[in-house]
Image (cartoon, rainbow, N blue to C red):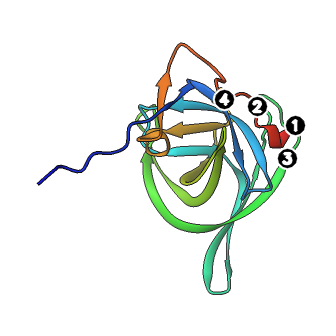
């Protein structure tokens, strides 16, 4: 019996890329691609949880422009989990988790996204290996290989 093989990734991305969120008010953010991080995380603040039609939701604000406090965009998404995530400094924190479509170049697919304060970090979005595994090769010497999304210009 033949072993199942994952498809080989054919698209190479850089260590940073433009990422769009069509399900979150079409926010686009510069992302750091981090294959050392399992989960993806977005800078979120003023986070609230609420119930809609019997389901848990999260409402939060994002600063889509790196190193700027404006504009601020308020978004909502269904809440799928709360989980402990260990940050790069070794501290575990409980984070809310949403699933939302992501646009990376011509590709659109759903990812899990944890909500956390990344104000002190260089990038407002960290795209972890769960999001890029079996989809892309990452060239750590390159940036923005997919360009800025055409739909955002």
**Residue labelled with disc 1:** 153
Crowding near pointer 3: few (<14 within 10 Å), some, many (20+)?
A: few
Question: Residue 127 at x, y = what percent?
Answer: 55, 39
Q: Are marks 1 and 3 in contact (CB under 8 Å)?
A: no
User: What is the spatial separation of the Cα atoms under label 1 and label 3, in whole angstroms?
Assistant: 18 Å
Query: Who's the residue at 77% across and 28% down the image?
Result: 67
Secondary structure at numbered mark 2: loop
Compare residues 14 and 30 and report the one nearer the observer.
14
Could you tell which of marks 2 and 1 lies nearer the N-terminus? 2
Q: Nearer the viewer, mark 1 or mark 3?
A: 1
Could you tell which of marks 3 and 4 lies nearer the N-terminus? 3
User: What is the spatial separation of the Cα atoms under label 4 and label 1, in whole angstroms?
Assistant: 14 Å
**Residue labelled with disc 2:** 148
In the figure, 48 relative to 88: above or below?
below
Q: In the shown orientation, is residue 27 left or right of residue 84?
A: right
**Residue labelled with disc 4:** 146
Could you tell which of marks 3 and 2 lies nearer the N-terminus? 3
Q: Are marks 3 and 2 in contact (CB under 8 Å)?
A: no
User: What is the spatial separation of the Cα atoms under label 2 and label 1, in whole angstroms?
Assistant: 8 Å
- Say which quarter of the image contains residue 20: top right
Q: Are marks 2 and 1 in contact (CB under 8 Å)?
A: yes
Could you tell which of marks 4 and 1 lies nearer the N-terminus? 4
Question: Residue 36 at x, y = what percent?
Answer: 41, 31
User: What is the spatial separation of the Cα atoms under label 3 and label 4, in whole angstroms?
Assistant: 25 Å
Query: Who's the residue at 66% across and 38% down the image?
Result: 105
**Residue labelled with disc 3:** 72
Q: Are marks 2 and 4 in contact (CB under 8 Å)?
A: no
Q: Nearer the viewer, mark 3 or mark 2?
A: 2
Crowding near pointer 1: few (<14 within 10 Å), some, many (20+)?
A: few
Query: Who's the residue at 78% across and 47% down the image?
Result: 27
Query: Who's the residue at 54% across and 53% down the image?
Result: 111
């Amino acid at each position: 019996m033949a072993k199942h093989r994952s498809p080989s990734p054919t698209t190479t991305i850089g260590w940073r890329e433009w990422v769009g969120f069509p399900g979150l008010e079409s926010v686009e953010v510069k992302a750091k691609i981090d294959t050392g991080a399992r989960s993806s995380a977005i800078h979120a603040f003023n986070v609230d949880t609420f119930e809609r039609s019997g389901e848990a939701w999260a409402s939060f604000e994002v600063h889509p422009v790196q190193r700027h406090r404006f504009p601020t965009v308020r978004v909502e998404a269904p809440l799928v989990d709360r989980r402990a995530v260990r940050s790069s400094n070794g501290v575990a924190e409980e984070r809310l988790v949403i699933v939302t479509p992501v646009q990376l170049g011509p590709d659109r697919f759903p990812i899990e996204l944890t909500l956390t304060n990344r104000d002190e970090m260089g990038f407002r979005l960290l795209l972890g290996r769960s999001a890029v595994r079996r989809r892309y090769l990452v060239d750590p010497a390159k940036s923005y290989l997919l360009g800025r999304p055409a739909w955002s210009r």
